[in-house]
Image (cartoon, helix red, strand yellow):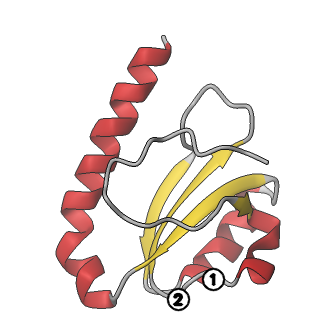
Amino acid sequence: MGNAAVPRVDGLEWSEPYQLDQRLEATPPDNGLYRIWYENSDAPLAYIGESSAIPSRLYNHEKAFGGKLYLRTQSASISTLLTNAKRSRQTFLARIISLRMSHH
């Protein structure tokens, strides 16, 4: 199975990785954060997102990118998402940039 190429930098508890096309079997949370990556890719992540409707959002990603991507989800309340969205995104993006630069 794909691996989570991004180390735990945020202190959050993420789900085990699963393929995007298996999202219904995995029962993702309604609200929270998610990260998506291609198996065996040099890039650590293809996408990082936050949503108050994760199942719907993942369906849209599957339609756009196909189902063979891997993902992890993390549950969070709407107020937590709104409070931490900017800080979480900045932390993730800084770490992704660091990882991408170390791969070159």
Residue type marked 2:
Asp
Residue 65 drawn at (x, y percent): 73, 55
The disc, 2 or 1, on the residue closer to the chain's N-terminal end is 2
Residue ID at (66%, 65%): 61
Q: In the image, is residue 76 above or below residue 20?
A: below
Q: Which residue is mark 2?
A: 30
Task: Examine the image and state in which quarter residue 38 appears.
Answer: top right
Mark 2 and mark 1 residues within 8 Å of each other at the beta carbon: yes
**Which of the two residues, 81 or 3, is positioned nearer the viewer here?**
3
Residue in the image at 37% along x and 64% along y: 12
What secondary structure is found at the residue carrying circle 1?
Answer: helix
Q: Position of residue 104 (x, y in %)?
A: 48, 10
Q: Residue at x 50, y 65 (%)?
A: 14
Q: Position of residue 102 (x, y in %)?
A: 42, 16
Give 49 or 2, whichever is nearer the viewer.
Answer: 2
Q: Is residue 91 left or right of residue 33?
A: left
Amino acid type, label 1? Pro
The secondary element bearing badge 2 is classed as loop
Q: Position of residue 6 (x, y in %)?
A: 48, 41
The residue that appears at 63% across and 83% down in the rendered structure is 55
Q: Which mark is residue 55?
A: 1
**Left or right relative to 81: residue 67:** right
Q: Gap in Å between the C-alphas at discs 2 and 1?
A: 6 Å
